[in-house]
Image (spheres, helix red, strand yellow):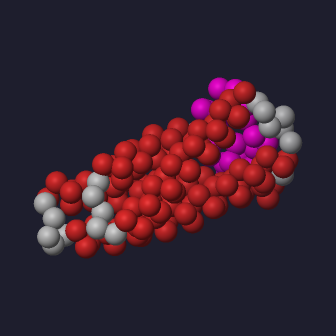
């Protein structure tokens, strides 16, 4: 399969076509699992507040930006301009890096929680780590296919 066919062509979809093209379909999963990470981090207890702050910043920022981009794609605000393809690729690359860093830091915090905290907090943090890495993988896949689309535009 050609790269442009695998990535939904060399232009961005508008309207409900966002839900039928790959990698733009990943917006939905990034939205759902990113929101879940946000909820899990907000309800968990992390012994190092700086780590929890970075993970919260990353999850909330990416959640809001993903929601905004999804909405703008749905209403067709990009007008098929190639600058939006560049924006899409850049955003997903940056979000991938931020989420990877946040996932590693959250895993570090969960390891430190293993001794001395109740299992409830430990399990919440483990769930946050797992879903954070899932979201990282979603953003990486979206970034790779967005870069393929950017290269073919």
Magenta highlight on residue 130: no
Task: State whether residue 63 is above or below residue 51.
Answer: above
Residue in front for this viewpoint, 79 or 66: 66
When the figure is inspected, residue 97 is found, relative to residue 143, above or below; the finding is: below
Q: Residue at x 19, y 70 (%)?
A: 114
How many discs appear?
A: 0
Name the side, left or right, on which 15 lies relative to 11.
left
- Give the side of residue 53 with respect to residue 127, left or right: right
Q: Position of residue 135 (x, y in %)?
A: 47, 53
Q: Quadrant of residue 21?
A: top right
Residue 145 quadrant: bottom right
* Residue 141 visible, this orientation: no
Q: Is residue 8 visible?
A: yes
- Residue at 75 percent across and 52 percent down: it is 87
Q: Which residue is drawn at 84% across and 38% down?
A: 80
Secondary structure, magenta segment, majority class = loop
Q: Left or right: where does residue 103 sit relative to residue 108?
A: right
The x, y position of residue 139, in whole percent, is: 55, 55
x, y percentage for residue 124?
25, 54
- Does the magenta-highlighted stretch encompass residue 10? yes
Identify the residue at image location x=51%, y=49%. Answer: 60
Image check: 139 left or right of 44?
A: right
Which quadrant of the figure has residue 120? bottom left
Q: Where is residue 61 in the image (x, y as percent from the top left)?
A: 56, 50
**Which residue ends up furthest to the front in the rendered image?**
49
The residues colored magenta run 1-24
């Amino acid at each position: 399969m050609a790269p442009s066919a695998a990535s939904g062509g060399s232009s961005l979809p508008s309207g409900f076509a966002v839900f039928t093209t790959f990698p733009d379909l990943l917006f939905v999963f990034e939205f759902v699992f990113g929101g879940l990470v946000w909820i899990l981090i907000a309800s968990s207890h992390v012994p190092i507040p700086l780590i929890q702050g970075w993970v919260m910043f990353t999850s909330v920022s990416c959640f809001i930006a993903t929601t905004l981009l999804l909405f703008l794609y749905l209403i067709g605000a990009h007008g098929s301009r190639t600058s939006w393809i560049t924006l899409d690729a850049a955003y997903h690359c940056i979000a991938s890096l931020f989420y990877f860093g946040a996932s590693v830091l959250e895993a570090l915090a969960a390891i430190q929680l293993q001794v001395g905290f109740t299992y409830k907090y430990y399990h919440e943090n483990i769930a946050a780590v797992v879903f954070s890495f899932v979201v990282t993988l979603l953003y990486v896949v979206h970034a790779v296919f967005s870069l393929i689309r950017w290269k073919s535009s």
